[in-house]
Amino acid sequence: MKLGFVMLAIGVVVLLIWLVVSGDAEQPRCGGERMSPGEWCSSRKSGPSSFEEKQESAAAVAFWLLRLGAILALGGLGVLVGERVTRKLRTGTTPWARARERRAAKAAAAARTLPERVSPRQLAREVRKFELPVVPRLGYSRQEVDGLVSRIVAGLEGKGPAVDRREIVSFLSSPTLSSPGYDSSSARVFLTNLFGLMGRT
């Protein structure tokens, strides 16, 4: 945060100096006094300089001051904005982060409201309704979870071999992670509840 403020402050100061120098590019000074066309200014260091030479010198300085000031000011502003966005992402206060949290909470709440006791086919229908939220960070592999759930549904509907509940336990103990993936907390609640319900069918 300090770096951004420092860069922005220096950039603003340089731009203020540019405003002064750009005025000298229009009407240069000699010893603090404005010069007129055709006049000469004598200096111990640089010798005599014409009105036009003073204009060119001030214009060259103004050219670089403008670019330097703009780079510093915009760079400092970029650092400040970047740090603010990063901080919001970490704390989950951005609109998309809040939307992701709402989806995860909704999925977790839905998983906890599965019927306490259902027939295998009823359970299969309930499982098909669930849509686990996808997150851009590391989460449960969508391919692995979808494959496991599809085999569970097929077993419940009698369209395939029944899935042993130990396979769910094995998956929960060492889940495959991917990015993007299913929100891990929602997927864990869903699979844990599904494990419990499979024992009651």
Image (spheres, rainbow, N blue to C red):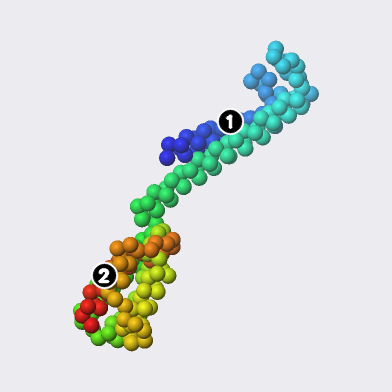
Q: Amino acid at mark 1?
A: Ile
Q: Residues within 10 Å of mark 2 (few under 14, many from 20)?
A: some
Sequence order check: which comes first, mark 2 or mark 1? 1
Dot 1 alpha-carbon crowd within 10 angstroms: few under 14, some 14 to 19, many 20 or more: some
Report x, y in % for residue 120: 27, 85
Amino acid tagged 2:
Thr
| Any part of residue 173 in sight | yes
Image quarter hosting the C terminus: bottom left
Q: Residue at x 38, y 78 (%)?
A: 150
- The residue that label 2 is drawn on is 192
Residue 122 on image: x %, y %? 28, 85
Q: Determine the secondary structure under disc 1.
A: helix
> Where on the picture, by quarter, is residue 186?
bottom left
Between 135 and 98, which is closer to the camera in this rendering?
A: 135
Q: Residue at x 44, y 61 (%)?
A: 179
- Percent coordinates x, y for residue 111 in the rendering: 28, 73
Secondary structure of the residue carrying tag 2 is helix
In this figure, which residue is indicated by the disc labeled 1?
A: 17
C-alpha distance separating marks 2 and 1 = 67 Å
Q: Which residue is rendered at x = 36% and y = 84% of the image?
A: 160
